[in-house]
Amino acid sequence: MSTQRGDLFADIDLGREKLINRLFHGLLVAASLFGLVILVLLIADVIWESYQGLTTFNIDPVQFLTEPSSSRAERAGFGASIVASLWLMALTAVLAFAIAVGCAIYLVEYAPETRTTRLIEANLANLAGVPSIVYGLLVLALIVNDAGLGSVILAGAIALALLIVPIIIVASIEAIRAVPSSVRDGSYAMGATTWQTVRQVVLPQAMPGILTGTILALARAIGETAPLIMVGTMLHATRYPSGPLSSFSAMPTQIYNWTYQADRMFNGLAALGIVVLLVFLVVMYALAGYLRKKYETEGSITNV
Amino acid sequence: MSTEPQSGSGISGDDSLEDAHEKNKRVRRVLFGCATVTVVTTVAIFLVLFDNAASYFFGARISEMIAGGGIERTVTFTEFFTGTRWAPDHSTPAHGVLPIVWGTLAITIGAGLVSIPIGTATALYLSEYANTETRNKLKPLLEVLAGIPTIVYGYFAVSFLTPVVVGGIASNIINPTGAWLESVSFLAPFVIEPVAEWMMGVRVGRYSLLAGILVVGTMTIPMVSSISEDAMQAVPDDLRNGAYALGATKYQVSLRIVLPAAVSGIFASYILALSRAIGETMAVTLAAGFNANLTANPFDEIMTMTAYLVSMARGTSAVGTVEYQSLFAVGLLLFLMTLSMNLLNDRMKRRFQEEYR
């Protein structure tokens, strides 16, 4: 082969170039695997520590899932925190969903091309980049202290809702834009108003996408710790929350307080708490994936 | 974007048509109200942070000043921005914010050194080298990395990274190297001796800067890799094919065609990752600790701005105390830092979109 290359390529060592290419390929593979290795280590660590908690410290799974927490590791459970997180999710969804979807509908279907619209859109990108702890500070000053609500579940839910509103808006805008404009034009041609078109034509088609985005946003919110800590949580969730106005410690904040303790048994409790939190996340992601898949297949049928 | 249909005078002249248009207008107003909520949030963040931070510097909130409250300098800006000790809650308080700003910067720079090369390499692999099957498997797994709550990373740092990895590096690599250097220190006593001394003295406590860097670096890899990959995918295939036609290898195409062509999108991903690292809270708090040290020693405990916020919130710092006020001064600084990063990112993205439209 090399004899056929002739003098033109005499100064190029093809073998060397190929070797460099192969080394580079190997380097990239190694870098790509780094993230996966950490992921595997992380999951293995949590499982191992949970196992330690169950065997070495004899944590009773039933007691763990049903009892409220305690300053004594032997009596601590996760039940009150799970309930607090469920309250938080429900309130956050109620607070965030309507506002976010309303904003998305306005931006896609109603908004004129004005400065105000551009300001709202630019502001969305900015809000999505605000550190979550800042939302906690905002609610701490405005709701918890100035409005005198105190460190209650509702205050935590307001912080989480502020955090996920931009996320739901972005997902909803995408879902609404994905509805073909021919469908809209058909509705308008029949003399429908914008709102009639939105409610009866656009929203039914966009809803699965909006719901998927909302579930993913809630999955983000359920693991958020920092805003809740700023709002103020109990060190140990020693009693079940009675409603939106009771003090609380949600799953992530309880895990934080357990992790922070020096006692090894608390570390086992934290690991088990993480397992529960991750189970919640997996269920939510699965639900979102199911909705997306169902929506995709249905969409393809209508397109055919 | 929208096409508001202009209603005619009403062909059928029935009332329901006018009702429908009336309703449409009402709904429009409500939806506009929803949209303004997002702007109100931003304004509220600004106002609340400035208002409360003012009481840290002037002894009164802006709202109180307007109401006629007295102004007294409590913390001077000079002390705040140039002081090198941060302990607002100490019995002899000090209000120099530098140590915790340094803590945040050290974590951010360190995390960038981890996530930027690894994230870029991952993006190059996914975009240029991996076949479709590998790509479809690897991408969702990397997204899992981004979906794990930060508190879980914090736990991972406490229970594994710090004791096993950082502790292992200290006691199996640094300390023995120090001992070896000590044994050869006669070669150049004044140079090697202090280094050897330091290396032998390295101990890892419950928290360390290095653990914080590792954990935040890992968390931000998916951000760099996914956005960079999008930018690389947007590079037109014509450019690649041109290079391949000239006999270039994938290595040459990756580094000389794809990277330069996608550079503004890639930079945008870096800025986003760094901005996330600045605002990162739980993982950094549990990995790097609560001690406001002005140190570059990766095995020392440090405190970031976010860790300070968490440490103060955990206590029952009452409204009106200096600790409570300091939360907002630090929060404001943090917000302004991430805001400027986000604006920069926005600019980069817009430039990138203009290049290949």
Image (cartoon, rainbow, N blue to C red):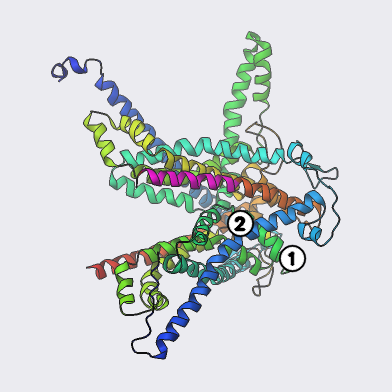
Query: Which residue corresponds to mark 2?
Result: A225
Q: Is residue A92 left or right of residue A180?
A: right
The answer to whether tags 1 and 2 share a subunit is yes
Q: Is residue A202 left or right of residue B35?
A: left
Question: In the rendered image, is residue A250 in sight?
Answer: yes
Magenta stretch: give its range: B338-355
Q: Label 1 amino acid? A: Asp
* Callout 2: chain: A
Residue at image location 43% in from the left, 67% down from the top: A210
How many neighbours does mark 1 have within 10 angstroms: few (below 14), some (14-19), or many (20 or more)? few
Residue A92 point in image, percent of width and height: 56, 68
Q: How many marks?
A: 2
Query: Does label 1 or label 2 sit earlier along the sequence?
Result: 1
The part of the image, by quadrant, that contains residue A242 is bottom right
Residue B156 point in image, percent of width and height: 56, 47
Residue at image location 77% in from the left, 39% down from the top: B78
Residue at image location 75% in from the left, 36% down from the top: B82
The part of the image, by quadrant, that contains residue A57 is bottom right
